[in-house]
Amino acid sequence: MQLPPLILHPFGGTGSASELLEGSRAALTMQGRVNASIAEPGGDPDTNDEAELERRVIAGRYQEVRMLLFLGKDLWRWLRQCVDFIERSEQVDPRINEQSFASLLVESPPIAVREKLEKWGVADRRAIFSRAIGVHSVFSEPPSADCLSPIFLRNYHRFADHAYICFQHLRPFFAIDPADYQFDLYASEEYSRMLSDQWEKDSVR
């Protein structure tokens, strides 16, 4: 059965990419200092520099949460589209729900989807997709950075992992056979261009 396509929209915002990069650099710098202090006990790092590095790490983590939330919106939209599609088809099984399709997406998407994600540079689709679903199950819109505690932002991936597990356990679900369900993956711009090309071909006929 061919499911609706999964369409991913661009996300970002003013300064988001630079804050992500700065946050990653700051995290690596702080990790290097921790390793150095373990190797040479008694070190005295510059506290001002340490505070600035921590600020950059937190800002970068916030952007990561924000981007996962927007990705989660696309994934949740697709999960609901799949359920609606199944309900309209003749092959209705009440055990198939959003959790069924979340499991399909995270654990065993079609080979073509996996290859496309790898081409896009997505190294760990399981973590990214599951965390995006988890984050969006908690937040419907991006909260302000001031509303999130530093402990959450530093460790958001752990919270997101558990949120996804909680989502999967909200309802019993039927683990569908990946061989029976196929779907395509598109960036929104790519999908719009494809539709435009198709409309042009149809208008010529």
Image: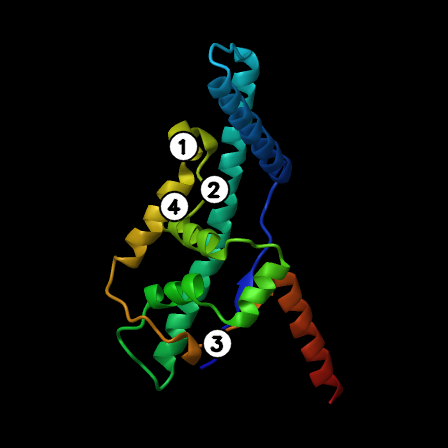
The percent position of residue 116, horizontal first and vertical second, equals 60, 65
The percent position of residue 46, horizontal first and vertical second, equals 55, 11
Please indicate whether residue 159 sits to the left or right of residue 69 in the image. left
What amino acid is found at the position of numbered circle 2 in the picture?
Val
Q: Which residue is pictured at 38% across the width and 83% down the height?
A: 89
Q: Which residue is mark 2?
A: 65
Residue 143 in view: yes
Which mark, residue 160? 4
What amino acid is found at the position of numbered circle 1 in the picture?
Leu
- Between the C-alphas of marks 3 and 1, the distance is 38 Å
Residue 55 in view: no
What amino acid is found at the position of numbered circle 3 in the picture?
Gln
Q: Nearer the viewer, residue 146 or 17?
A: 17
Please indicate whether residue 98 sits to the left or right of residue 154 in the image. left
- Quadrant (top left, top right, bottom left, bottom right) of the C terminus: bottom right
Please indicate whether residue 118 sits to the left or right of residue 152 in the image. right
Mark 3, Cα crowd under 10 Å, few <14 / some 14-19 / many 20+, is some
Q: Which residue is mark 3?
A: 182
Which of the two marks, 2 or 4, is nearer to us in this view?
4
- Between the C-alphas of marks 1 and 2, the distance is 10 Å
Q: Secondary structure at mark 4?
A: helix
First along the sequence among labels 3 and 4: 4
- Quadrant (top left, top right, bottom left, bottom right) of the N terminus: bottom left
Q: Which residue is pictured at 38% across the width and 29% down the height?
A: 151
Mark 1, Cα crowd under 10 Å, few <14 / some 14-19 / many 20+, is few
Q: Are marks 1 and 2 in contact (CB under 8 Å)?
A: yes
Q: Nearer the viewer, residue 64 or 15?
A: 64
Q: Which residue is mark 1?
A: 148
